[in-house]
Amino acid sequence: MKRILLCISIIFFTSFFHHAQQDKIVFIFGHSLVVHDPPLIPTPSDETTVPHWLHFLAEEANLDIAVNGQYGFLQQHDDLPPISQWGFDSVASAWDSDSEPFSVANFDTVLITAGNFIQYQSSNQPYYNDPNTTPLSATLTIVDWVNNQNPDMVTYIYENWPDMAGFLNNGFPASASEFQAYNDYTEGDFHDWWIEYQDFLVAERPNEIIKMIPVGPIISKLLSQAPYDQIPISELYEDDAPHGRPTIYFLAAMITYAAIFQSPAPDSFIVPNTVHSTVANNYQNINAFIWNELLDFNFSPLGESRVFINSPLSVEDEELYKINIYPNPTQNILYFDGELDGLDIEVYDALGKKMNIEYSSVTNTLDLTRINSGVLFVKFKSERGTYIKRIVKL
């Protein structure tokens, strides 16, 4: 029954997001947890890179993807414009930075990732060696620059996986208990840092599309379950950084593909033997697992996805309700006008907790003066259905 439900979920949401499947031109502000080249253990091609697998997954789905990118951490990436450092055997390039400006490539998608060893303090705190820069400020510099190049740019935060060295008592590879502690951290405090990081970014740039791909936590959750918990650590990673072997980058690409194409990876893909057999033999089950994890990754239980670009209140919904909400973002009073008769209006915080705020039908307002800054959700209920709109309280 569980497998049937997973299949139904994939069929339904594949149809729902089908319109989002289109060719992609991607630039990645990355490092070796995206592109690990050369690996310590040689591979036939670029199997320890996410773009390599993105290309072949897209090809199976009759889609095209071009990828360019550069190495660095956020402090280097905010020195703009970027350069095109990467080249792959099979992945198409869209840009020659030696002879063309960034805008010529028509990038529509940007991935940004932070270091995997800075999560000991919040992303709005300065780097220990750079008191004038925070991970947040560096990311905002990049976001502003790429959106100036293309106002319709979609930015994804690529959540990687943490450094493993601190979990090891006797060096690499990790013992079973050490690896479980590592995975628990990846799904826990490490993941919380990235969620707060995205929340900060969305609050600072509410009019930009800033989504997040929880690559590391999904991989850790998968590898903590049977039969994947039986795969030897040394066949997943090659050091304590930890740089992955092909299986890790393949899983990372499956997750990234589902996020940026807004559809599960194609079930018909034949996994090559460079990927561990346990993963290859369970590819379709893993595909369903990843898709359902992404579907559940929301700003609140109410609606808006942290991953997918599906507005909780679509153009059609706005036309149906004929409601205008302003200003958004707002500092105190939120105003409504339009066809408001028969509507119940409620406000929820980012965790899905209903806020004690009453809508005034006399002034058609919500008073948010006493509410803390952050992302909120306004829920409209009527006989026409239920719809949700995200707002930002400054």
Image (cartoon, rainbow, N blue to C red):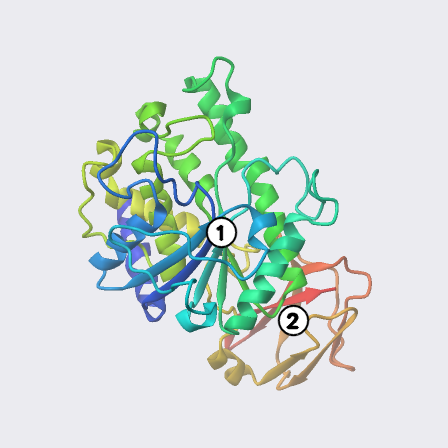
Residue 193 drawn at (x, y percent): 61, 43
Label whose residue precedes the other's in the sequence (2 or 1): 1
Give the amino acid type for the residue marked by disc 1 in the picture: Phe
| In front of the other: 109 or 196 | 109
Residue 361 shows in this picture: yes
* SS for dot 2: strand
- Which quadrant, please, contains the C terminus? bottom right
| In front of the other: 199 or 14 | 199
* SS for dot 1: loop
- Which quadrant, please, contains the N terminus? top left
Residue 169 drawn at (x, y percent): 51, 14
Tell me: residue 356, above or below residue 124.
below
In the rendered view, does 175 fall on the left or right side of 117?
Answer: left
In the rendered view, does 75 fall on the left or right side of 100?
Answer: right
The residue drawn where x is 77% and y is 66% is 368
Give the amino acid type for the residue marked by disc 2 in the picture: Ile
Residue 350 shows in this picture: no
Mark number displayed over residue 126: none
Splitting the image into 4 quarters, where does residue 189 fall? top right
Mark number displayed over residue 345: 2
Tell me: residue 163, above or below residue 201.
above
- Mark 2 or mark 1, whichever is nearer to me: 1
Splitting the image into 4 quarters, where does residue 381 fall? bottom right
The residue drawn where x is 48% and y is 42% is 160
Residue 229 drawn at (x, y percent): 35, 27
| In front of the other: 324 or 220 | 220
| In front of the other: 228 or 367 | 228
Measured in 3D between alpha carbons, the distance from the residue under mark 2 to the one under mark 1, in whole angstroms, is 24 Å
Residue for badge 1: 297
Tell me: residue 284, above or below residue 21.
above
> Badge 2 local density, few (<14 within 10 Å), some, or many (20+)?
some
